[in-house]
Image (cartoon, helix red, strand yellow):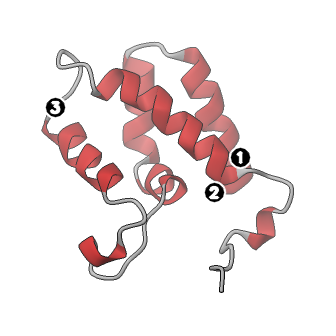
Amino acid sequence: MSKPDRYVSFVGIDGDSNARKLVALLRRHIDDPARTNRFWELFKDKLEKINKPDETSGFSQDELYLVHAYINNIRELFETYDDQPALALLDRIEAESC
């Protein structure tokens, strides 16, 4: 039995794919030792636990959840490095999926 999509109200919007693309853009920054910090290192740990509810007390996280939960931190990072394509995608995700 497949797991139901909890984002059914967003029919026609590929929020999961957009969130995965955004995380890829984010990783370009936070995987750079000169741009990371303790917060982003802990965030990367959360990314590693995506779809591993046995490691998160039964709570299943995904990229879209993490983007929503940390949207202000992500925005600040993209603004710091003037990453306009990433900011545009973040704005789109916020408008379509938040």
- Quarter location, residue 8: bottom right
Instruction: Name the residue beneath numbered marker 2.
Output: 98
Q: How crowded is mark 1: few (under 14 residues within 10 Å), some or many (20 or more)?
A: few
**Label 2 with label 1: CB-CB less than 8 Å:** yes
Q: Position of residue 13 (x, y in %)?
A: 79, 52
**Callout 3: SS:** loop
Mark 1 or mark 3: which comes first in sequence?
3
Q: Distance between the residues labelled 2 and 3?
A: 26 Å
Instruction: Name the residue beneath numbered marker 1.
Output: 95
Query: Residue at the location (46% across, 46% down)?
Result: 71
Instruction: Name the residue beneath numbered marker 3.
Output: 37
Q: Where is residue 5 in the image (x, y as percent from the top left)?
A: 68, 73
Q: Residues within 10 Å of mark 2 (few under 14, many from 20)?
A: some
Count of numbered circles on the image: 3
Up/down of 79 relative to 14, above or below = above
Left or right: 91, with 26 as reference point? right
Q: Please identify the residue farthest to the left as the structure is shown.
A: 38
